[in-house]
Amino acid sequence: MIRNFLITCLLLIGFSAGAWAQDDQFSAGAWAQDDQNVTVTGTVTDEQNLPMIGVSVVVQNLPGLGAITDVDGKYSITMPPYNRLEFSFLGYDKQTILVKEQRVVNVQMKETQDNILDEVVITGLGAQRKIAVTGAVTTVDVAQLQTTPSTSVADGLAGVVPGIMAMQSSGVPGEVSEFWVRSISTFGANQSALVLVDGFERDINEVNVEDIESFTVLKDASATAIYGSKGANGVVLINTKRGKEGKINVNAKVEGFYSTFTMFPDFVDGIQYAEMANEAKLARNEQPLYTNEELEILRSGLDPDLYPNVDWQDVVMRDGAWSSRAQLSLSGGGKTARYFVSGSYQDQGGMYKTDESIKKYNTNANFRKWTYRMNVDIDITKSTLLKVGVSGSLRKKNDTGIGQTDLWTAMLGYNPTTAPITYSDGRIPADYNSDYKPNENDLANWGRVNPWTLATGSGYDENWTNNIQTSVQLEQNLDFITKGLRFVGRFGYDTENNSWINRKKRPELWQAENRDSDGNLIFNRIMEPLTMTQSSGGSGTRNEFFEWELHYDRGFHDHHVGGTLKYTQNSKLTTVNIGSDLKSGLARRNQGLAGRASYNWKYRYFVDFNFGYTGSENFHKDHRWGFFPAASGAWNVAEEPFIKNTAAGEWINMFKIRYSWGKTGNDNLGNERFPYIYTIEDMVDGDGNPTGGYDFADYPAMSLIYGGIHYSALASTGVTWEVATKQDLGVDFSFFDNKLTGSADYFYEKREQIYQTRSYLPYMVGVESNPKANVGSVKAYGFDGNFAFNHKIGKVDLTVRGNMTVSKSEILERDEENTIYTYKLSQGHRIDQAMGLIDLGLFKDYDDIRNS
C-alpha cells in the first residue's frame, strides 16, 4: 500500500515538472481547456490541389476519435485540444499536425516515393492504381527498353517483359522480332497481340523508344474483353510522352552498337570436303570423286581455276556491322498549352561485303528510318482538354538485286570447290551441268551464279515506306453533372504507302570445263550478259478510327465505385493495287460497344466486370455480333487486421490474390473476305473454249467436255467468331517497404471455333470447292512471373530483376486427313511443332540390324 502511494506521488511530481517546463501560454491554455472539446474542420488535397476522398483522420493516442474525408475532401472532427491529428491514406505519407488554438486545419498529402501501392497502371479503360487492378497486367520499365541495343521496340521485349515470348526469325536489317503474349494459342490467321499507341491500333515498330511514356501488357480476359474481336491474343498499350508546364526541356541522345552473328555454320575447307566426298563415294561402292592427283592439286593450290578452295561465307559476309541511333526532343509549355516534339534517325548496317569499284549504288542490305512526333495539349477551358498528335516515319530498305533468299541458297549450296570467285582471266563463273540449260530470258534463273557475283553484281533493290498518323482527342470533365464523371472522344486518321524498285542485271556467265594441250582453259558460255532492267510496284492503306468513352470514378467513405462505357468503330481501306475484284475496294470495318463496372471496399476487396459487344463485316448477319464478358476479383490480404495488427504487417506492404475469367474473340480471317457469300464462275476462256466442265458419259470417255458455270466458292453462312475462354489465378506482392516486389500467374486458355478451310472432305459429299467452317480447337496453359529487388546502399542503387514465362499449347481438334499415324497429325501436338524421324543411332553389328 505504502509502495503504491509512493509511486503515485513520484508520477504526479514528474508530470507537474514537465507541465511547468512548457511554454506559459501552452500551459495556461491546457489548464483552461483541459475538459472542453473543440470542433476542427478542414480540407485534404493531393499535390495537384485536388480533393482526396476517404482520407482517414484520427486523434493520435485517443482510440475511437476519427473521421473520413467526403467527396469534396472535407472533414469535421470533435476532439480535445492540444492533441495531434493524424492523416493517412494508402500510397501517401502520413502527416501529423498538433492542434492548438486553430480550428481549421487544411492538409496537402504527398505521395509516398517509390511506393508500388500507388503505382499507376494504364489499362484499356484508363489509368488505375496498381493495387486496384484485378487482372493480369504488366507495366514495363521503359528505361529497360531504352537501353536495349536495337533499332525497334519489338526486339527489346524478349527477356524484359514477363509473359512475352519474342523470336527474331531473320537477321535482315529492318526485319523485327515477332512476339506473342503468353503463348501461341491458335493456328488461325491472327496470332499477334493488339498494339494500341495513344489509344489507336498501330505498328509497335513505328514508335521511337525514346518517345514512350508508359508501356503496359494486358494478358488475361478481364483486361482485354473490352476489345471484343481484337483482344484474344493479348493487348499492348503504349502511351507517348506529352509536354509539361515549365521551361523548354531539350533531350538528345546518340548511340551506336556493333552487331555480329550469334550463330553461323562452320564449313570445312576444300581439301577436307574433297576427302569426305571421296569417303562417301567409297562407302557406296562408287568411284571416288577426286583422284589422288586432284587432291594434291587442291592441297598445293596449283590450279585455282579448275580446283578452287573458296570460303564463300568469308568472301561474302562481314564479321559484323555498325548501327547507330540518334534522337532529339523538345518539350515544355505554359498553363494553357504544352507540347512535345521529337525526331529520330536510325541506321542499321548490312552484313554483306561490297565491290569497291561500284560507286553509283549500294548493293548491301541496309536499313534506314526517320521518325517524327508532335503532341500538343491545349486547355480550352478549365474543364476541357484538347490533345492533338501528329507522327510518322520514312523507312528505306536496301538489298541486293537477286534478294536474300537466292543469295543464301547459293551461299549455302556452293561447296568450296564448286567455282572460283572469278577466273584468272576475269570471266564470271557459274556452276551448271550438261543436263540443264538455263533460260536466258528468265531473270530469276541465274544458272547457279557464284555467291560473290550475286551479292555484288546482280543489281540492287530499294523499298520505301512512309506513313502519317494523326489523332485528335477531347477530354471533358463533367463534375458539374456529378462528381467523378468525365467524357473522352478521339479520332484518328492514318495513311501508309509503300513503293519498291528492283533493278537487276547479270554479267556474262562462263564455266571452265578443262584445259587444252597448251594449258589454256576451255570455257563453255552459259549466259549472255543482261543490262540493268527495272521493275516496280507499290501498295497503300488508309485507316480511320473513332471512339468515345464515358468514365465515372468516385469514392464514398470506404466504398469506391467506377464505371466506363466505350463505343468504337474503325475502317481500313486498301488504296493502291486493289485489282479487279470489287471486294478489294471495300473497307474492312468493325463496330463495338464495351463497358466496365468496378467496386472495392477499403482497397481490400475488389470486384470488376467487363464486356465487349462487337460486330464484324466478315460474318453473316445472323452471326455478325459477338458478346465477350469477363469478371475478376481480388483480395488484398495485407489490409486485413490479422495482418496489419501483427508483426507481419510491418514488412508486408501488399499481398493481393486475384482471379479472372472471361471470353475474348477474333474475327481475323487473313486475306479472305465475306465467306458467307458464294462465288460462281464461267468455265470458258475469253475465246469461248472450255477451261473445265462436264462429261456426260460420252464414249470414249472425256472425248467431249461441255463448258458451263460452277461454284468456285461455296457460301459458308455459319462461319462466326473464334472464341478464347481464359482463366487466370495470380498474386501480387510487395515486402520490406517495397524493396521486394513481384507477381506470379497461372493461366489456362481454350481457343474454340478456329476458322479453317475444310480441305479433307470426301468426294462423296459432292462439293466442287472447299467450304469454310469453325472447326479448330486449341488449349494453352502455363505460368509467368517476375520479381524486383531494390536497395540503396549509401549513394548506390542496387536493383536485381528477373522474369520467367513457361507455356505450352496443344491442338485438340483440326481439319486434317484421317490417319493412324500420329506423326502425320497436328492433333495432340503443339502449334507449328516440327515433325520428323527421331535418330536412334548407328547399327553396331549385323545382329543389331537383324533384330531392328
Image (spheres, grey):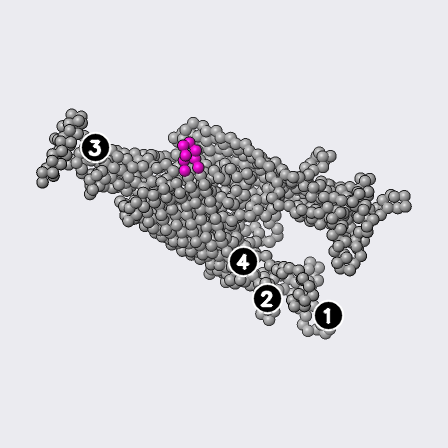
Distance of label 4 from label 2 (alpha carbons): 16 Å
- Horizontal side of 396 relative to 554 (left or right) equals right
The answer to which of 753 and 843 lies nearer the viewer is: 843
Distance of label 2 from label 1 (alpha carbons): 41 Å
Do the CB atoms of the residues marked 2 and 3 lie less than 8 Å apart? no
Q: Counting other residues with Cα less than 10 Å from the Cα at mark 3, is it few (<14), some (14-19), or many (20 or more)?
A: some
- Residue with the mark numbered 3: 99
The answer to which of 143 and 282 lies nearer the viewer is: 282
Q: Position of residue 495 (x, y in %)?
A: 54, 42
Which of discs 2 and 1 lies nearer the camera? The answer is 2
Name the N-terminal-most of marks 1 and 4: 1
Which of discs 3 and 1 lies nearer the camera? The answer is 3
**Circle 2: residue type:** Tyr
Q: Position of residue 551 (x, y in %)?
A: 36, 45
- Horizontal side of 544 relative to 83 (left or right) equals right
**Residue found 54% across the figure and 43% down from its top:** 155
Distance of label 2 from label 3 (alpha carbons): 84 Å
Q: Quadrant of the C terminus?
A: bottom right
Do the CB atoms of the residues marked 3 and 1 lie less than 8 Å apart? no
Q: Position of residue 837 (x, y in %)?
A: 62, 60
Q: Which mark is residue 821?
A: 2
What residue range appears in magenta? Answer: 791-798
